[in-house]
Amino acid sequence: MKVLITSALSATAHRLKSKLNIDNVILGDYNDLPAFMLSSGKMIKLPDPCSFSYTHEMLALCLDNLIDLVYVVDSGEIKLLLESKQLFAEYNIDIKVADDEI
């Protein structure tokens, strides 16, 4: 299983990552991330939730990176991704709110 946690720069994302007993966890953020964080492959740049095609960009990113589960931390992302939960489910990608897991 491969997991994506959004809001990579937040303490919540790091707390969740440490609680999960999963080896394949990637942190992602739509805010600017320093190049050294991206180069390790453990963090990725996410699309901006203000984009009109955000949901489809996130779906493509998840498919390209073989993501099975997305933990969403940012409130703006939560609303958009929960509205599209059925679309992601059609591709066997589960969307969960990070607050429920911490």
Image: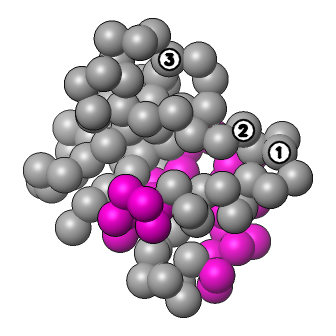
The x and y percentages for residue 3 are 32, 56
Q: Does the CB distance between marks 1 and 2 fall below 8 Å?
A: yes
Residue in the image at 21% along x and 67% along y: 1
Part of the protein shown in magenta: 62-87
| Badge 1 amino acid | Ser
Query: Label 3, label 2: how many angstroms apart (C-alpha)?
Result: 13 Å
Is label 2 in a helix, a strand or a loop?
Answer: loop
Residue 32 image label: none
Report which quarter residue 43 is drawn in. Answer: top left
Image-based side of 41 in relation to 77, left or right: left
Q: Amino acid at mark 2?
A: Asp
Number of other residues with Cα within 10 Å of mark 1, as a class: few under 14, some 14 to 19, many 20 or more: few
Q: Position of residue 40 (x, y in %)?
A: 24, 25
What residue is rendered at 57% in x and 40% in y?
46
* SS type, badge 3: loop
Q: Is residue 52 above or below residue 27?
A: below
Q: State the colouring used for the structure image.
A: one colour
Question: Residue at position x 84%, y 41% from top?
Answer: 50
- For the residue pair 38 and 93, the one nearer the viewer reads as 38
Q: Secondary structure at mark 1?
A: loop
Check disc 2 and report the residue beneath it. 48
Residue 12 counted in the magenta span = no
| Residue 66 point in image, percent of width and height | 34, 65
Residue identifier under label 3: 33
Name the foreground residue: 14 vs 92.
Answer: 92
Quickly name the residue at label 1.
51
- Tag 1 or tag 3, which sits nearer the N-term? 3
How far across and down, in percent of the image, does residue 18 sit? 21, 38
Q: Amino acid at mark 3?
A: Leu
